[in-house]
Image (cartoon, helix red, strand yellow):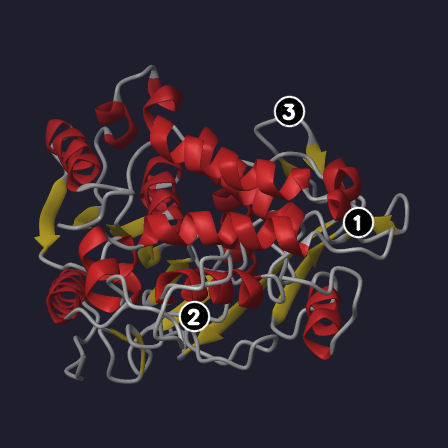
Amino acid sequence: MSGDTTSSPIIDASAREADQPSSKCVRFGPDAPLELDSGTALAPWQIAYETYGTLNTDKSNAVLICHALTGDQYVASTNPITGKPGWWSMMVGPGRPIDTDHYFVICANVLGGCLGTTGPATTNPDTGQPYGLGMPVVTIRDMVRAQARLIDHLGIETLFMVAGGSMGGMQVLQWAASYPDRVFAALPIAAGARHSSQNIAFHEVGRQAIMADPNWMGGDYILQGKRPTKGLAVARMAAHITYMSDESLHNKFGRNLQDRDNLTFGFDADFQIESYLRHQGMTFVDRFDANSYLYVTRAMDYFDLAAEFGGALPNAFRETATRFCVMSFTSDWLFPTSESRAVVKALNAAAANVSFVEVASDRGHDAFLLDVPEMFSTIRGFVTGAANARGIPAPGGRA
């Protein structure tokens, strides 16, 4: 976890992406501000996105994929920073459950992110320097407002489906609540209608780790030519534990030693799990901005959909015509099934069209990103049913 001030091709590319993304990008000028929940407005601003497949003539086959906390717009294509395949390429693509031979898929980097949508690493036009902590704090609803502006720009009136897991699932629920007439089908996975106190606590540990790094420099590390890599790596390590289950950690690592036969009686990585977490931390810092981590975790913390509707979650979905499929995983303790059931209960109270599936998996929260056959078959079935209801030719394909 060293190299706080050292440049590298990956780090340099990551810095460029904040202003000049490799993906598509829509820039909104001073005359098109984005109003934020904080009471401020952001202008000018930009949103970076990728698209897959072809928009049909009546624009009825558009699917918006919302990414999770540290995801990006490269849902089904190579990430230009890491060179790795898209983070949901098992789900999105030709013949996949969300079939790009039949649907026009859009995925945007969230507001506050660091891969081309306006965020703290973006250049502030008023100063010519990165926003840093001068960037207004944003919310999940702000992220969705920005996405809605992108959808408007693309000339799409109604989305066939909005889908996403974790923070992406929060965005799905916000879309359904804020723009019910624009969402035909909604697929929130491993998410909840608010962030729990336990989840806020884990995020605070991560933020404090970043801010305690002397190279954070009060958020001005870019100007100072420094990078709080140690703090950001620790934040990622702590968060990554919450994405897995106790069973998956035991099955994968147990108490196995790392490249040694005996304990060292020191503080090196004796155990495989220690080495794994250190690796997760070190690889993360090359692709993600530390201030962006502060902003997107804060957005999740502030999310409380019921609070927007008089404290009654059913009011968020009153008279909605959107079709919902809510999905959870048995071993997910970050967003346990009880959180999904609360959403389903609210949807039922609002007389919404909703199905619910709890998928058996020992993979923890990250199961939605992994090869889980029941998840694939469930999503394929929901998408096909919704397509039939909307009159879109339903694909065959494979998981």
Q: Is residue 69 visible?
A: no
Which quadrant of the rendered structure holds the N terminus?
A: bottom right
For the residues carrying marks 3 and 1, which lies nearer the camera in this image? 1
Which quadrant of the rendered structure holds the C terminus?
A: bottom left
Above/below status of 121 relative to 211: below
Q: Earlier in the sequence, mark 3 or mark 1?
A: 3
Under tag 2, what secondary structure? loop
* Type of amino acid under label 3: Gly
**Quarter of the rendering containing residue 318:** top left
For the residues carrying marks 2 and 1, which lies nearer the camera in this image? 1
Q: Counting other residues with Cα less than 10 Å from the Cα at mark 3, is it few (<14), some (14-19), or many (20 or more)?
A: few
**Quarter of the rendering containing residue 220:** top right
Residue 81: give x, y in percent of width and height.
61, 75
Under tag 3, what secondary structure? loop
Q: CA distance from mark 3 to mark 2?
A: 31 Å
Q: CA distance from mark 2 to mark 1?
A: 29 Å
Q: Counting other residues with Cα less than 10 Å from the Cα at mark 1, is it few (<14), some (14-19), or many (20 or more)?
A: many
**Residue at the extreme top of the image, as rendered:** 310
Q: Image check: 224 left or right of 256?
A: right
Query: Pointer 3: what residue?
Result: 39
Q: Foreground: 358 or 349?
A: 358
Name the residue: 60% across, 78% down: 80
Q: Earlier in the sequence, mark 2 or mark 1?
A: 2
Above/below status of 350 relative to 325: above
Under tag 1, what secondary structure? loop
Residue 216: give x, y in percent of width and height.
74, 45
* Type of amino acid under label 1: Tyr
Q: Which numbered tag is attached to residue 221?
A: 1
